[in-house]
Image (cartoon, rainbow, N blue to C red):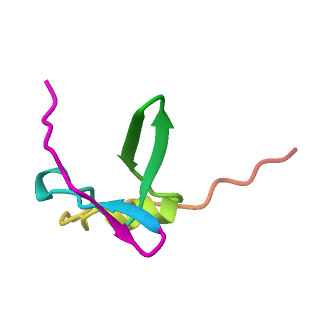
Amino acid sequence: MSKQRRVRLFRNGRNQAVRIPREFEFPGDEAIMHKEGDRLIIEPARPSSLLAVLNTLEPLDETFPEIDDRPPEETDL
């Protein structure tokens, strides 16, 4: 069963806003919001590009073996 918690709504200029409790925080600084009937659904925004996804990955700490990468043999077509 999912967690739930009562939160307060407040005004931020002309917008209504809600504070997201720490246990519900999303990574990053963007989210997707949509409405289903009376429900307001907020989901983490997925990275929008391959470069954005790659930037979220930790660097590999491995050494890779040397590969004998010779050019292909010439072929008569």
Residue occupying the point 45% across, 48% down: 33
Position of residue 60 in the picture relative to residue 68 (left or right): left
- Location of residue 55 by image quarter: bottom left
In this rendering, the answer to whether 13 lies above or below 8 is below
Q: Is residue 68 visible?
A: no
Position of residue 64 in the picture relative to residue 42 (left or right): left
Count of numbered circles on the image: 0
Q: Position of residue 11 (x, y in %)?
A: 36, 68
Q: Farthest residue to the right: give it.
A: 77
Q: Position of residue 16 (x, y in %)?
A: 40, 61
In this rendering, the answer to whether 66 lies above or below 38 is below
Q: Which residues are magenta?
A: 1-14
Give the camera-side residue of 59 and 76. 59
Position of residue 21 in the picture relative to residue 15 (left or right): left
Q: Is residue 37 visible?
A: yes
Is residue 35 a member of the stretch shown in magenta? Answer: no
Residue occupying the point 13% across, 59% down: 22
Give the camera-side residue of 30 and 18. 18
In this rendering, the answer to whether 25 lies above or below 77 is below
Q: Position of residue 40 (x, y in %)?
A: 40, 40
Q: Farthest residue to the top: give it.
A: 1
Residue occupying the point 45% across, 50% down: 32
Give the camera-side residue of 13 and 2. 13
Q: Main secondary structure of the magenta part?
A: loop
Is residue 10 a member of the stretch shown in magenta? Answer: yes
Q: In the rendered image, which quarter contains the C terminus? A: top right
Q: Position of residue 45 (x, y in %)?
A: 42, 53
Give the camera-side residue of 59 and 48. 48
Q: In the rendered image, which quarter contains the N terminus? A: top left
